[in-house]
Amino acid sequence: MHQQHSTAELPHLRRQKILLILERDGKVMASELSQHFAVSEDTIRRDLAELDSAGLVQRVHGGALPRPKDTGKDYFTRIRETDEVKTRLAQLSANRVEDGQIVLFDSGTTILQIAQSLPTDICITAVTASPMTAITLAEYKGITVILAGGQLNPATMSAGGHEAVRLLQGIKADLLFTGVCAIHPEVGISSLHFDEVPVKQAMLDSASHVIAVTTADKLGAVEPFVVAPCSRVHTLITERHVASGNIEDYRKLGIDVVQADA
């Protein structure tokens, strides 16, 4: 009890210990931390707010989660990064595409890699709001590319606004590869950028089958703007090693989870 009281008097030490617990468990709950440190939940909420402001955690209702690794990196920085995991995820995803399909490609560097990984002789109609992805797809002789226009967001290198949403709403696609900033079993898919939410929602509404492709650090994470519940995803393609959270939580929701080999 004396140790708990000392910790309560040293907020910096308590916050360091909260980070260690978060690293170990993959998430923290304010109610549990309150009991662990023998302080009020308001005190813990202030701790989590401070850690969130410092970019060390991602606050969610009732607690906190690890902050996604890519948060804050610009699009072209992420393109230049060599990532064997993303390459493997892109290859697995590209193998799902069949001739004759209408395929929606969301924004994001992983989705761009999927476009780069398609079979050279594939014949599909591809729809995207990402100019970079459209240019990549245009290099395939058998792919007809439809580019949704609108105002370009430099952070995502994707078009948004009424024009893009209206075009997407008029398409009935066989398949959607959706980019994921964060996906949480309870919160769902969420984004760091408010203006891309309606575009992602329009894509989800227009696709018969939705494949979410993401690295493990996005699992269990939450960003400020919620796109849709996890029930909108049919297949989740991710890496074999999951550092935090429980992959079974997604399977329990009826999602077909495919994990890449190490």
Image (cartoon, rainbow, N blue to C red):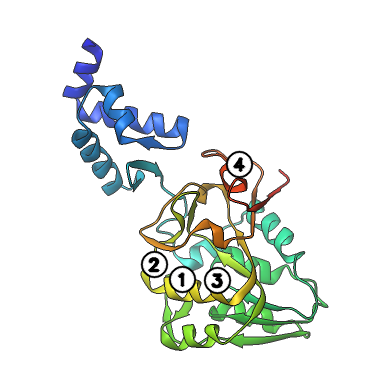
Q: Amino acid at mark 1?
A: Thr
Q: Disc 1 vs disc 2: Cβ atoms closer than 8 Å?
A: yes
Give the numbered dot on residue 193. 2
Q: Earlier in the sequence, mark 3 or mark 2?
A: 2
Query: Is 30 placed above or below 178 here?
Result: above
Give the distance between the C-alpha atoms of the residues marked 4 and 1, in whole angstroms.
30 Å
Label 1, residues with CA under 10 Å away: few <14, some 14-19, many ≥20: some
Give the numbered dot on residue 156. 1
Q: What residue is pinned by disc 4?
A: 248
Q: Where on the picture, by quarter, is residue 12? A: top left
Q: Earlier in the sequence, mark 4 or mark 2?
A: 2
Give the distance between the C-alpha atoms of the residues marked 1 and 2, in whole angstroms.
8 Å
Q: Earlier in the sequence, mark 1 or mark 2?
A: 1
Of residues 104 and 90, the one nearer the viewer is 104
Residue shown at 83% from the left, 78% from the top = 121
Q: Comparing marks 3 and 2, which lies closer to the viewer?
A: 3
Query: Is 147 placed above or below 183 here?
Result: below
Residue shown at 39% from the left, 67% from the top = 193
For label 4, the SS is helix
